[in-house]
Amino acid sequence: MRQERISLLGLGSMGRALAGALIGAGHEVTVWNRTPGKAGELVARGAREVSSVEEAVQAGGLVVVCLLDDASVREALAPVVRGLTGRDLVNLTSGSVQQARELAGWLGGRGVRFLGGGIMAVPSTVGTEGAFILYSGARDLFDRVAPVLSPIGRPQWAGEDPGFAALYDMAALSGMYGMSAGADHAVTMLHAEGGDLETFKRAVLGPWMEQMLPIIVAGADPSATVPEEYNPGMQAVGLETILAASGEAGVPAELSGHLRASLWRMRRAVDAG
């Protein structure tokens, strides 16, 4: 893998993890953060910290952006966009499909080669075998950039549409938060009724979710169809029972949104025949 100059904008928990992985791979990394004081460990490992976005851009090489949101990306890049003409920029900031497309158009109109991105990892797993990073935009740019950024996670191209990395990212996060909501609701129910929480998580919830996850993902469907063997009418009754039990245990209704979404799907399938 060739070593390159990389300017990283943003040193939140994720930005620091990205920088650490790139430094560890031998890249020459320049870092900037709006609030100073977060780069100490990275500087000790060889990073160069600068006090302005202008300095980071002037360092040359690939620009990687990992900030809070689309607005913060626009705010950071607006004063330096002319200095980015002819350069490659990868945006790993979470945002919507439309925001990614608009950002690509804004930068592309100023001669910046753009890849949208989505980080399929948490800071502690950046650079590990399970981490992967979604990219979308021009395939030739992805082919050039992917080997450089491979130390942060396995590169996966999502397509030419610059918004597709954001699309896949947002959709995958939706699935993750759905699982998280289900687990939170489950342990809240157990705790409310005096169950052994640690035994439940270790011996019941964890193994059950691991067993069901492949089935759930394979069966996910945007249509009104539910496979006949899943018996949506029976599942609707079961979901109503869970909701009733949740209410009896005093679990806040806000924690049961995932159950109500599933109940809506089962009822819709029953109505569709």
Image (cartoon, rainbow, N blue to C red):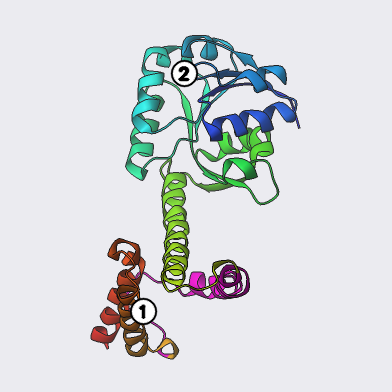
Label disc, if present, on residue 35 of the rendered structure: 2
Mark closer to the observer (2, 1): 1
Q: For residue 175, which quarter of the picture?
A: bottom left
Mark 2 secondary-structure assignment: loop
For marks 2 and 1 on the same chain, the one whose residue lies earlier in the sequence: 2
Q: Secondary structure at mark 1?
A: helix
Residue 216 image label: none
Q: Main secondary structure of the magenta part?
A: helix
In this rendering, the answer to whether 269 lies above or below 76 is below
Q: In the image, is 254 to the left or to the right of 20?
A: left
Q: Identify which residue is drawn at 40% across, 32% down.
A: 104
- 181, above or below 51, in the image: below
The x, y position of residue 33, in whole percent, is: 50, 20
The region drawn magenta spans 199-228
Residue matched to label 1: 242
**Which quadrant of the structure image shows residue 273?**
bottom left
Question: In screen coordinates, is 202 left or right of 51?
Answer: right
Q: CA distance from mark 2 to mark 1?
A: 47 Å
Residue 38 picture location, percent across and down: 56, 21
Report the quarter where the N terminus lies: top right
- Between 194 and 212, which is closer to the camera in this rendering? 194
Q: Of 259 and 250, which appears nearest the observer?
A: 250
* Residue 133 x, y percent position in the rendering: 57, 44
Q: Residues within 10 Å of mark 1 (few under 14, many from 20)?
A: some
Is 204 one of the magenta-colored residues? yes
- Percent x, y of residue 45: 72, 21
Give the answer, above or below, for where 206 lies relative to 6.
below
Q: Would you call the spot at circle 2 few (<14 residues within 10 Å), some (14-19), or many (20 or more)?
A: few
**Looking at this view, is 258 or 89 the one in front?**
258
Residue 40 falls inside the magenta stretch: no
